[in-house]
Image (cartoon, grey):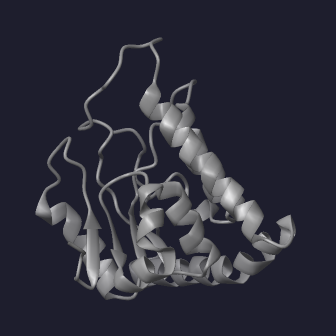
């Protein structure tokens, strides 16, 4: 069976995400966003930042999308448009960082649209100082995305040039929206 809708919503079976938390993601796609991400960035206020959080920030930096911070298709919930599905390819959604790299590289409109604090809800699967196979998998997924990006680019600097104009337009658009909403941007405190 294949998804037939115009908006695809990605969830996790480990915990409940309320419908009211998903509505902003759906609305963002309805308003033209191709990939609406959870704004959750991971906990970065500690002296030791988890390697998965660092991988998410690093991939976004490599993709010249530092405005996304640690927002990632690895985190749920998120929503994508039918256009994004067709552009990314369903087979690439199995590796979320790869899907995100493809989406950004191919010029899709990606936005961190809604904060859903999943860090506190997601059950801990291992004890401290024990093997972390899920973390290993996610790091490997990020490396796979970087490998795809290198192989898809004629040279390393073309990535930055390709996305700098789009990123500048996105930042200017967000600043204009911020001014329309009282002139100040709100920032969510990470890790709470």
Residue 44 seen in this snapshot? no
The x and y percentages for residue 121 are: 23, 38
Residue at 17% x, 43% y: name it.
15
Residue at 52% x, 38% y: name it.
52
Residue at 30% x, 26% y: name it.
124
Residue at 38% x, 51% y: name it.
75
Residue 127 seen in this snapshot? yes
Location of residue 3 (image quadrant): bottom left
Location of residue 132 (image quadrant): top left
- Image quadrant holding the N terminus, namely bottom left
Which residue is more in the foreground, 189 or 1?
A: 1
| Residue 95 appears left or right of 22 | right
| Residue 92 appears left or right of 115 | right
Location of residue 140 (image quadrant): top right
- Image quadrant holding the C terminus, namely top left
The x and y percentages for residue 19 are: 12, 63
In the rendered image of this protein, does residue 112 appear above or below residue 146? Answer: below
The x and y percentages for residue 42 are: 44, 42
| Residue 171 appears left or right of 129 | right
Residue extending farthest front: 1
Q: Count up the numbered dots.
A: 0
The x and y percentages for residue 157 are: 85, 69
Which residue is more in the foreground, 145 or 16?
A: 145
């Amino acid at each position: 069976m294949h998804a037939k809708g115009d908006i695809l919503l990605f969830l996790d079976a480990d915990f409940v995400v309320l419908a009211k938390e998903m509505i902003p993601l759906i609305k963002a796609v309805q308003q033209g966003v191709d990939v609406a991400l959870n704004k959750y960035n991971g906990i970065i206020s500690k002296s030791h930042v988890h390697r998965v959080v660092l991988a998410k920030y690093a991939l976004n930096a490599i993709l010249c999308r530092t405005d996304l911070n640690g927002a990632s298709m690895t985190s749920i919930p998120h929503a994508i448009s039918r256009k994004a599905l067709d552009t990314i390819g369903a087979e690439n959604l199995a590796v979320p960082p790869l899907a995100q790299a493809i989406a950004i590289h191919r010029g899709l409109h990606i936005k961190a649209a809604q904060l859903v604090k999943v860090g506190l809800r997601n059950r801990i699967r291992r004890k401290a100082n024990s093997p972390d196979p899920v973390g290993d998998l996610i790091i490997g997924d990020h490396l796979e995305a970087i490998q795809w990006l290198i192989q898809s680019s004629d040279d390393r600097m073309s990535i930055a040039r390709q996305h700098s104009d789009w990123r500048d337009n996105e930042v200017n658009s967000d600043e204009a929206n911020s001014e329309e909403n009282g002139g100040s941007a709100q920032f969510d405190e990470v890790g709470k």
